[in-house]
Amino acid sequence: METISRISSMLETARELTLEAAQSATLSRGTAPDYTSQSYSVPHIKKLLDSRNEREVLDGMRKVISIMYRNDPSEASLNFFSAVVKNVANPNVEVKKLVYIYLVHHAEAEPDLALLSINAIQKSLTDQNPQVRAMALRTMSGIRVPVISQIVSLAIKRGCGDMSPHVRKAAALAIPKCYRLDPSSLPQLIGYLSTLLGDSQYFVVGPAVAAFLDVCPDRIDLIHQHYRSLVKKLVDMDEWAQLATLRLLTNYGRKCFPRKTERVNKSTTKGFYEDEDDEVADNPAAEDGTEVEVLHPDLELFLRSCKLLLQSRNSAVIMSVVRCFLYLAPPDYIAAAVGPLVALLRSPQDIQHVALYNIVVVALHHPTMFAKYVSHFLIHANEPSHIWCLKLELLTILFPHCGLHWKGVIISELEHFSRGTDPDLVRECVRAIGRCAQNDMNTANHCLRVLLSQVSSLDDTLVSESLTVIRHMIQQDPASHKRTVIELVKHLGSTTNPEARATIIWLVGEYAGAEPEQNIAPDVLRILVKGFSDESEVTKQQIVLLGAKVYLHHLLLNPPAEEAEEPKPNVSGGITVNNEWADEQKEERQEEEQQEPPKEDTITLLWRYILLLTRYDVSYDLRDRARLYKALLSDPRSTQLASLLLLAPKPVPYAPSPSETRKDLLIGTSTLVVGAAAGSNGLKGYESLPIRVKPGQEPDSRLRDVKNDMAEKTPTTAGERLDKALRDHDTLAAPASGPQKNGAATNAGKGRTLDEWLDDEESETEEETDSEEETDSGEEEDEEESEEETEEEDDDDEEDDGEDDEEEETDSDRETVKKESQRLL
Amino acid sequence: MSSEVDALYIYDEYSAPIVEHVYRSRPPSAASILPLYKAHPAPRPSLVYLPNAAPPVTVFSITHSNLLFLAVSEVEAEPLLVLEFLHRVIDVLEEFVGAPLLASKLQSSYDVVAQLLNEMCDAGIVCNTELNALQEVVEVEGWMGKLLGGVTLPGATTPNLGSNNPLKQQLAAASLAQGPAIPWRRPNVRHTSNELYVDIVESLSVVMAPSGRVLSALVSGTIAFTAKISGIPDLLLSLTAPGGQQAIARKIDLPVFHPCVRLARWREQPGELSFVPPDGRFILAGYEVDLLPMDPSLDRPPSHMEKIFLPAIVDIRKSLGPNHSEFEVRLTLNTNFPGFPPAASRPSAGRNGSGTSTPSFLAGGSGGGGGGGGGNSSSPVLEEVVVTIPISKSVRSITAMQASRGEPQFSPGSDVLEWRVPTKDAGTISGTATLRCTVAGYQSVDEGFDDPAETEDVEANANLLQGYYEAPTSYQTSGSAKDSSSRKRKTKKKKTKKSRSTAATTSTIPDTPDEPSDPSKPQSPVPTPPLQQQQQHPASSSIFHPPARKTKAQLYASLMPNSAAVSFSVRGWLPSGIRVDSLNLDPRRSRGLGEGVKPYKGVKYLCVSRRGVERRC
């Protein structure tokens, strides 16, 4: 989605904007602070900070912050540390905010002075104003002085039980900070986290999930009982909380929901999915008795609430949903997400770029789903290279899945851009054409024709790249490309690009010399040899190689059995390699001889002529090569070694899509975008998804039945209430059908007994209470109460065994309301 | 894996760091990271990995109004999350400091910037980016004064809350205690004049083949909304398209919504947006419309194409004139917008249009300072028409630019030719304008081309020239005879690059008779060398193409542009045809708005195409 700033700039005409910019530039020149002036001098600001007048203090603080942010060495604002710390207890909220910002920024540099402020901050933790409490908690945890970690931990504990969700949110956000200060406080922190994860406010749960991911992402056992409430709150959370929750639940799903398939026939699926979207119903119903992935009802609950997020304005959310579907859900879910994923291309270019990387990876997994959107990936002339590069790749990935019409369009597009002036674009386009041909045999011939037409182009890059691609194509299927080689040979007359000539000559030697009835290689060689001296070195090398091959083929076809006298001069030539003069003499003599008795055929003659030419070439390399071939072919009767060397079958080249290497990276990550540069393990902190749990090894699904229904608070507006009603209507269907399916599908997977599971629960709660005892020192009662309440409730639910969800829900709902009202009173 | 932002840096247009906000750990400083970032070659992607920084970091970047925003992360982070965060930062800063963002504005309100950045992201975890919520938390001194003095951004709310208003403090505290009821709307909004504005902006992107055939036509639309209304209003916005309510469901594709929109309502009745808006200006929804829906699995080109109306079309013809060094750009403007009476026959503005908008909507006025008159919904206004032609780097200069209208501009060394066509003259806008240009390559091109003896010398010259001296094909001699055959093939394959491909394809097989490209077998084309022919004359060197003579035409052909794009904006017209049907306030569900208060409503349509209509050639 476009951002406001971009839309605003579209709505204003360009002229208006520049006018405005100029205007405000002149205006702000007057108001821009002049840091050299009297009012910014150190004594003056100190005086302001020490003033009793709140306004003056505020003014002073603003100036300090300005100095702090200015591009100065930070010592400048450090001068005020003591003066600022004095104001930490200032009752004015505005002043406090600025002081806190200053403290967090500088505390590391002046830990001792910072500690002086801790007391005052602690006092603010019990302020009446929740905003002040939240700020204090936040600041305290932000001060990076390890000594205070215990105090911070206590403050978090207090914050967890605060009445205001803002403070609880601050507490959640403080947990990772405290963990970084002192990793040994982890057990306590996990205790707080499990409280916060069960909070009734989505507002609090989101940051709690983020903290969980930061502190102890592997403690899946903490999530079981909150799973359903997390799924329920997912839609209501803000985007950032949704992101964290999606990440958590995707990991959770991989660990807790094995992939199950079942042979299902039509009737049962129909009954099951009756009230759902048609796409869900369609797919399993389509084929009778085929393997169909069966979703655990809890997983399905999650996936369905994810679907609602596909219309989020936040591109990262959409990407997370796609990730979740890609790694967790059957293909029909990902089909629903493909559209929104492609819609990310409407975003600003920076987001487009990242989105394209991910689209490519998803398209590599499921190309057919993207075929519908192929027109979105056409390249525009003004796009930067990193964008068109990915679009090109997408076009080639989708190419085999389009109809002939679009195939034609894609090839024409590629052809068009391959005639452009940007060498990179040209190169990529030609390669793309090659990939199209490789992936879709039906159109390979057409692609080939396009490429052949490029060979005579004026553009160097285009010609050499086209030939490389053509060579690959011929190598992949030499049998059907005999004529292509001949076609290419014609271009030898017009192409002067050395690389191109070399490639063509190599192809001739490889594919046009073998069969006697189609053997054009000797002819080509004959013509090339005429202009040998004018060729470039690369080309010369290939000519020599071609000569060697032609000669070898000749020898193989006409084994020189009867020519007994022939070997002798050859052998001697081979022996006296070092004596070049003598050698040449002999050859010259041979030539004379041959002219008289036409025993020696033309090909042998040609070969000798080539050797002669190369002997006097300026290039060492070329001369060495010639000698090698000469020695190799010196004995016309022993051709085994030579054929091994020269006629060995070459490995068939295969050009995969460039992103094929990234295919296994997790989508939505930086590592995916950075690619190989990030090293083999990805960027620091990159983790692939956990391996999907095998059926039978997953945790018991009844762990999730523990209803911790602090649910949602009663909505305050009419609109909210309506929304809730609608949502409930939507989502209730799934849990209602939950237990039935549960019984049907997961019985097999139950490895643990109820007792074992209860044991687990107990040990968990024990841990919680332990940590509470540790930190119990200066507490107030109400928090304790509320925590105990939740525990009690847990116990209740355990006894219930979660059989009758409906009733329980309403019960606990009522309870919640009661509790809430008590609290508020 | 934890997604976190380690630091946020902002640099001004001279690459001097102006804001440096570190969220956690110790990332490289703003000054040290910039040279590493700049070392990355020029079109920099939004995500750059800097392994040489200490510690190695990934850098996410956005440039906005000449300011460079960098977010730095030491560990793996979700790139989209960070980029979205940066965009929100820009939005929020613009709202608080005033748009357009300028370095001096940021510098003069560091205290606000500090509070905002502090509030939006806590120790690397993005936590609060909702504008209304931030307005609750961050106070701006003399906010109103700054806004009125500095900018007159229409979207800015009129705050009527003094910073030390005790009542407000109390109310805020109450909301803090309970948690926000509606996270995106601040409570207790009061406005003296209640106003609602809808701005629908669509940006058009069309790709046309050289034949003039449209390959794709996509519209991406955005609905911006400005709500300045007291209390908690519950609004219902209905959209309509030609063809009624069913049409809109078909038209609007892949919508995304602000969280305030009730998705259930949309799914039941597409085109109806029911929501409680945030206070102020926000993006309500985004959507796209495919003007040319095509089934990708079709084997044949669709026989029936939807007719697309484009107010500006560009066409380009190259290799003209005696030297083949000229090209002509033809711009066709058409202001006879469908659904509106023709521009010529209509009396001057003021008459209310063709009844497409309800009378309660007063035209224009919502957005731009001073742009009020332009957006009259009854008469779409075509503006800012600019033709952009990418020019090859091997072109030294363009001489003799003759435009029938407007002023073309090309500075040597730049890679585009820009041609502005004024649309505000008296008289009709519709019609055709042409621009004829002569290109000149670098000097040596002109010297050497007819002298084979010099070829070698020139080849040793600049790399740039290599392309002109090899493997030339004769565009002129080979073309016409084979046209028919290859064109047949083209149409069969539905090829779209007519003239150029024809020349090229035929030139590769000049000695080929027409039979191999038999149109009846387009899928099994044999690349056509008649083998026997060659075997018959092995003695001659005719199995190679003869090296053709280089002609001026070829030399200039490589200097010719191969695409042109036109940018324009139209006020009062949307390519998708979507219109606002009604905007109603639900009196039963709304609260806090006085009895009988009728908010002022305005609608504005704008179609923008930034180099969006692109013609290949």
Image (cartoon, rainbow, N blue to C red):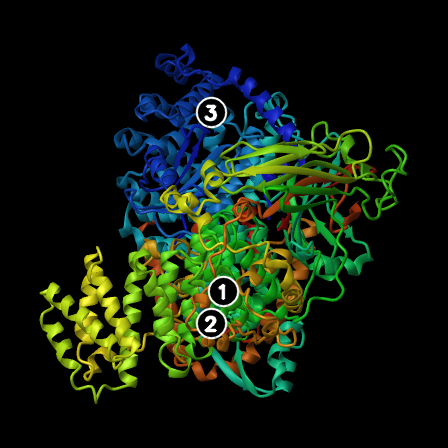
On screen, residue B442 versus residue A540, left or right, reads right
Q: Which residue is mark 2?
A: A484
> Few, some or many C-alpha atoms within 10 Å of disc 3 (few <14, some 14-19, many ≥20)?
many
Picture layout, residue B605 above or below residue A399: above
Quarter of the image that includes the N terminus of chain B:
bottom left
Q: Nearer the viewer, mark 3 or mark 1?
A: 1
Tell if the residue under mark 3 belongs to the same chain as the one under mark 1. no
- Element under label 1? helix
Q: CA distance from mark 3 to mark 2?
A: 67 Å
Q: Position of residue A509 (x, y in %)?
A: 34, 72
The disc placed on residue B601 is: none
Q: Which residue is mark 1?
A: A452
Q: Answer whether labels 2 and 1 touch (C-beta < 8 Å).
A: yes
- Element under label 3? helix
Sequence order check, earlier mark of 2 and 1 = 1
- Element under label 2? helix
Which residue is at 50% across, 32% downward? B66
Which residue is at 40% across, 62% downward? A662
> Few, some or many C-alpha atoms within 10 Å of disc 2 (few <14, some 14-19, many ≥20)?
many
Type of residue at label 2?
Thr
Q: Position of residue A173 (x, y in %)?
A: 42, 47
Type of residue at label 1?
Leu
Picture layout, residue A24 above or below residue B452: above
On screen, residue A612 versus residue B74, left or right, reads left
On screen, residue B602 versus residue B147, left or right, reads right
